[in-house]
Amino acid sequence: MTGHTVLWDPVRLTAAEFAGCWEQLDLGEPPGALGLSDVDPVWPAEVLVGLRRKGIALRGARLERQLRALARRDYAVDVDGCRVRVRASVVGSIGVLAERRGDEVVLVSVPHYAVPAELLARLPESASVEVTRDGALVGASRCGPPGEAAELIERTRPG
């Protein structure tokens, strides 16, 4: 974290729980940058049990809002690196980052203006970065160094 205000406590899900929640909300294809194509979603009852066990079930509305922001974004950045996979999205004044490390997906909500800094803090040594605005690609960097990706993110940031 970069010291920016985190709006809600981070939510930690297994990749299968994330895929299951995504499917239950009928959000279409999950973000490609998270590399979930080979993950089998968990059945709804299993997802609910897992969320209850983690204390997330009571925060279900927040989780749903985060997932919907990732799916229907005004501005999004996808980072696909060797060890780091991130989707960052902005909808209105809310920014959401979904970071996959191994079998875990962590969701963090921050103010919209904090998304670029939070994203830059997560950049690996080499990463492919795609930036979209309103669903249209506005910039991309393939396997570039962190400085190149940082410049792309800064150049295309909203407002």
Image (cartoon, rainbow, N blue to C red):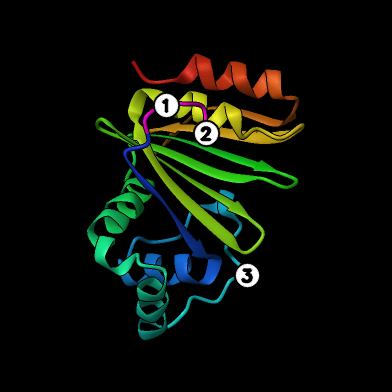
Asked whether the viewer can see residue 134, the reply is no
Q: Which residues are magenta?
A: 1-5
CB under 8 Å between callouts 2 and 1? yes
Asked whether the viewer can see residue 65, the reply is yes
**Pointer 1 residue:** 4
Numbered mark located on residue 1 in the image: 2
Report crowding for label 1: few under 14, some 14 to 19, many 20 or more residues within 10 A (C-alpha). Answer: few
Separation of residues labelled 3 and 1 (CA atoms) = 33 Å
Residue 156 belongs to magenta span: no
Residue type at numbered disc 3: Asp
Q: Quadrant of residue 57?
A: bottom left
Separation of residues labelled 3 and 2 (CA atoms) = 29 Å
Q: Quadrant of residue 149?
A: top right
CB under 8 Å between callouts 3 and 1? no
The quadrant of the image that shows the C terminus is: top left
Separation of residues labelled 2 and 1 (CA atoms) = 7 Å
Relative to the observer, which residue lies in front, 156 or 95?
95
Q: Residue 92 in the image: x percent, y percent?
A: 24, 32
**Pointer 3 residue:** 38
Depth check, mark 3 against mark 2: the one in front is 2
Q: Residue 120 in the image: x percent, y percent?
A: 58, 27
Depth check, mark 3 against mark 1: the one in front is 1
